[in-house]
Image: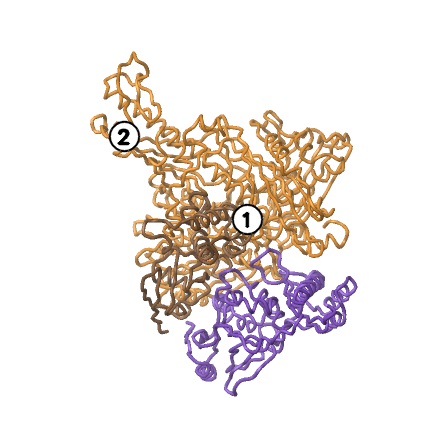
Amino acid sequence: MSKHHVSATINGEPAEFLCEPQQTLLDALRDELDLTGSKEGCSSGDCGACSVIVDGRVVCSCLMLAVEAEGHTIETIEGLARGSKLHPLQQKFLEHAALQCGFCTPGLLVAAKALLDRNPNPSETETRYWLAGNLCRCTGYDKVVRAVLDAAAELRGA
Amino acid sequence: MPMLDYTAPSTVEEAIRILSGASGTAKLLSGGTDLLVQLRSGRTKPDLIVDTKKIPGMIGIRETDGGFVIGAATPGAMIGECESLKKAWPGVVEAANLIGSTQIQGRASLAGNLCNASPAADSVPALIVARATCIVAGTKGRREVPVEDIVTGPGRTCLTRDELIVEFHLPKRPPRSADAYLRFIPRTEMDIAVVGAGVNITLDRGGACSEAWVALGAVAPTPILVPEAAAALVGHKLDEKVLAMLDGAARRACKPIDDKRGTIEFRTKIAGVLVRRAATIAFERAGEQR
Amino acid sequence: MNDVAQQFKWVGTRPIRPDGVPKVTGRALFGADLAMPGMLVGAILRSPHAHARIRSIDTSKAAALPGVKAVVTSADFPEQKFEYVGPERVAMNFWHMTRNIMAREKVLYEGHAVAAVAAISKAVADEALSRISVDYEVLPHVIDVDEAMRPEAPLLFPDMITRGVDPAPTKPSNISKRIEYKLGDLEAGFAAADVIVEMKFKTAPVHQAYIEPHGCVARFDADGQGELWSSSQGHFVVRALTAQLLGMKIGDLRVYPAEIGGGFGGKTVVYIEPVATMLARKSGSPVKIVMSREDVFRASGPTSGSAMTVKIGVKKDGKIVAADGVFKYQAGAFPGSPVMNGCMCAFSPYDIPNARSVGYDVVCNRPKVAAYRAPGSPISAFAVESVLDVVAQKIGMDPLQMRLKNAARAGTQMLYGPKLAHNGYAETIEAILNHPGYKAPLKKNQGRGVASGYWFNAGGESSATVHVNEDGTVVVATGSPDIGGSRASMAIMAAETLGIDYNQVRPIVADTASVGYTHLTGGSRVTFATGIAVVEATKKVINELCARAAMTWKVDAEGVIWEDGHARPASSNVGDFAPLSLKEIAAKRGLTGGPIGAAAAVNPGGVAPGFATQFCDVEVDPETGKVTVLRFVAAQDVGRAIHPSYVEGQIQGGVTQGIGWALNEEYIYTPQGRLDNPGFLDYRIPVASDLPMIEAVLVEVPNPSHPYGAKGVGEVNIVPPMAAIANAIDRAIGRRLTELPMSPPKVLAAIDSGKGT
């Protein structure tokens, strides 16, 4: 079984890795690139914990083959903060206590970033539907939604 | 140890050559949101994955003579962002956009939704009532196939092993016409349709239905066209009596199964409800175009 | 909140959690994120059958596969003694537990582990599993609780004689245990009632459905010592159980707490840890095991499904005079459902003179149940709180006023023995009665339902150490895994006690060798019991700080007090000394006796129970049976909220789990006894778009037994929602649903049939 060589841009940096054809992008991020911030909650695209942004669109990295990443631009949770400066979404999640266990949090943040990149002023309903693919079992989503809306307001003001 | 390989051809011809020359089982990959789940569960064990997304034209939407051509691997999110398509075929777009989460929308395509051949595929009833066709390419050349002829049974299509869908064609919209798609799921998102219903109608100048198409999903081994339900609409404006006839015709067309997502009784009742509601939306939309 | 703000500097405020940044940047390490050099991948072969005898297992072809480093079956684990150990309510039997982590004579549910391998890659491990051949004799199986109780049901254990029945039955059955609590004269009570309502109920098993699958890494040395990194609700418990199942000394196993991605009770027991440790022992290399989502659903958790009958009698004025309940809970493949809790909690919110609850613990061919948020109580409460709503409607009384009239208060005799020691319930009812939303008008097909709940809460053993660093900053180490912000509440309590800034305190969750024994994060016990340990240790540190100041000032230690983060002379008689800050005392520690720190180990009494009262508004689609939750308001007596945001979060999360339980979550089986929905696609937990904001109303009736008044807050919030929603549906469309989940097909059937299920 021959491994594929993949070149992609990950969190703004050129990255290369080897992968087997059946490996998912999530496998490659976690096992080949040590980017374990993307989580495996289901491996079937139902929980969103592995959300990453590929060429500007949020996708489940468990539903994309690693080889498909060739030539594409990928943003993961590890790329959300700028150095030690947190993204407003990250800061608002902390301020609103929008995480309890924190396992779904990376996926929620990545999906929320994709939302705000596209729609700087989402309604509560739009936010809830956009995030419906990100399961959270701890929070009941209340504080998550508030944090996203608050971050959107701050980003609009900035 | 299972051996799997991956290839991403850059032309349709190359894809056909690979498919026809493959020694084992080859699987076409577009969005991958069904295929990867099946790969992981072991439900499918291909020897080769042929990624279609590097082929020019497979992703994208263009307008032609008032109609639309949608690349087979175009993700749902892109379909939802095409304002002219949404205006002309709102039912098709809402159906395509109902497939899975935001994340799934970033990948899932019409060709994948169709060729996965699930009776519950959301986009299929909407494409059927829109009279959409597929351009299928293979070693014998290209053929145009109505969407309703592609799926032959659960998990089965009429495509031969050397064939792939390259694009979908949506016809030009006549005036005073509109479509709508509704599905029923237990939650608000993330579920497979328990029932899906697509309705596409054209009204005459007086506001009565002059032409209608009705299709149902998840109530038979494949998505089905229901001409009897369409017939209940033609020649009429929507009133309680017409809606009741439509409901009855839809119910009579159902041959569902009992499974974890719904019972025969429930699916049958819901099919009637959804067809009524979808028809009401389609009539409203068509009426607004006067 | 004003008096609290004046009373405390940190308690009741909402600072950012100390472990927050790694969790929003993806840097926090959960169970599956750990890696070690030379680490192998462990994988577990699971039964495809619901019930089968294992005639033989042949692992030779797997062992011969290149890259396979170890193969394990039940033969590798020592046999355990058959005995129930620990308090009756949570008794364990290691004879059962060793069979649950690796089947011996029989497989008892689909997904039951039968063998495991460690290999150089996942692909090799999976291939090895496919080469293990198990010769099964498939046996008839039983899934449903009522079916399992029938005399002719297939028996999971041919020698199981029901405990708690006198005289003991002569014939074996699937009924592991019968329990009964009685108070007063039931017959006389019902005879005095003006209205009696008796109803039957069924609930489906539901899973905790934490998003993080179980994950662990184990290593084992030739001298018999091992280390384990595990995502659990209690690494001390993981250590104890794993050591027992492997026949190790507890001191030879060190367990490190990984960050835990949700547990809700489901990560209080071991599944993969003993297997990974055994594979590490046999292979000599570190081994990681991570469960798949399907494994999690098939072979961990869930909580019981049930069948219940509840009968309640009231006077016309709403006074409850008698209550009787029969509660049959599925335990899954091995005894130990939370039916005892169910019996104890069922009627506990109320002062009822004549009452009885009878419970049955029933085994069946499903995964062995694990604790799930207030284990047992939500199930029996669904029945009791539904019947109460029917009763209230019959006598034409507001359901909250009826609850208030019967509310248990401090001193009320409880069915299960003790007298209630704490108030708090009536206050939650009043909070909802006074909520403006409770009287808001509703539209067609909408209804408002209320329900209440009770949960014991827990105390238990906890340890903490508090160290003052060289610069006066402080480390607080506890043994309680943080599943929802408990590091923040520990830091708040330490900072409050010391009178220093919250950000000067760094709380950690220490491994089993670095802090004293600490029981599970469960039972809503951490802020209470571990909080007391933290405050005790902090007080010892304060005593030491005062002593150091006294030494510096050359006065008696009694002459020094601690105030606002400083040592001060107790009075002007002691002398005229400028106050010494923590920082200053820390800087001089070398001259006054060396490092400053203290430990505390506690097993506190004075646990106060949790009470909750909630209302919700729902809308029912009369044509599809779909129920939409429009509004949810949840009041809970929290004692005092140490960090209100995380208290609200517990309430919002518990309510949401209850909504899922009420409307859509269930284990669905095929006729062959296989789980038909082992994934998040068809095991339907609530998604963001299903829900409104969940309004948490914090009722603060402080607990005098906790230094800051805390009561456990994690669990009771999941008790009322199922009944609240059923009651709301009934009031919306006039149909009483008595089976969970109240999914659209059931609601529509009830609408179309003209009556409830």
Where in the figure is residue C468, as x and y percent of width and height?
29, 32
Quadrant containing the N terminus of chain A in the rendered view: bottom left
Q: Colour of chain C?
A: orange
Q: Could you tell which of marks 1 and 2 lies nearer the N-terminus?
A: 1
Q: In this orientation, which residue lies closer to the viewer: C155 or C190?
A: C190
Q: Colour of chain A?
A: brown
Q: Please, what secondary structure does the residue beneath circle 1 have?
A: loop
**Callout 2 amino acid:** Lys
Q: Chain of mark 1?
A: C
**Callout 1 amino acid:** Val
Where in the figure is residue C594, as x and y percent of width and height?
23, 29
Q: Is residue C245 visible from the viewing direction of this image?
A: no
Q: Give a yes or no on whether discs 1 and 2 share a subunit.
A: yes
Residue position for label 1: C369
Q: In this orientation, which residue lies closer to the viewer: C94 or C745?
A: C745
Relative to C328, C92 lies left or right: left
Residue position for label 2: C583
Q: Which chain has been coloured purple in this picture?
A: B
